[in-house]
Amino acid sequence: MPSINSPSGALPARFRRERLLIVGCGDVGQRVARDLRGRMQLVALTSSIGRLDALRTAGIRPLVGNLDDPRTLRRLAGIATRVLHLAPPARDGGPAWWRDQRTTTLARALRLRS
């Protein structure tokens, strides 16, 4: 069995350093990102094309996706070693937060394997 210290047992390059996916990178998400910059790779899911440059300037790699459209979340599986979910539930007055469809959609996307 290869050792984790040997090249044949090494982790894939994308997991050599912790990678945080921030879902809902508004004020609180950006504060967290500021505190963690340099300590881990930062990725943020955004549904707003207009925020891409601001996220990049903040040292965050943006990914465009929408929690209300599962098709846009397919590439999230395995993208991060940690996830910070700060996005609010849908504003439609739907189910309580613990049954929020957006959270369920995100959880499903994160565990899919391509």
Image (spheres, rainbow, N blue to C red):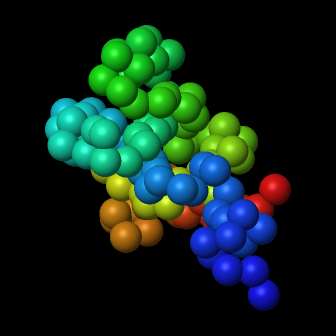
Locate residue 1: give its quadrant.
bottom right
Q: Nearer the viewer, residue 50 or 81?
A: 81
Number of numbered callouts drawn: 0
In this rendering, the answer to whether 60 lies above or below 40 is above
Please name whichever residue, 13 or 60, is drawn nearer the observer in this view of the structure. 13
Residue 91 visible? The answer is: no
Left or right of residue 18: residue 64: right
From this viewpoint, is residue 54 visible?
yes
- Image location of residue 58, percent across then percent down: 31, 23
On screen, residue 17 above or below 95: above
Residue lying at the far bottom of the rendered structure: 1
Q: At 55% across and 63% down in the image, what residue appears?
A: 107
Query: Which residue sits at x=28%, y=38%?
Result: 37
Question: Residue at the front extreme?
Answer: 6
Residue 93 vs residue 8: left or right?
left
Instruction: Give the quadrant of the C terminus.
Output: bottom right
Q: Quadrant of residue 100?
A: bottom left
Front-most of residues 10 and 59: 10
Q: Residue at x 54, y 56 (%)?
A: 16
Relative to 51, is 89 above or below? below
x and y, in percent, of residue 59 in the image:
36, 27
Residue 18: percent from left, percent from top: 44, 56
**Residue depicted at x 63% and y 75%:** 4
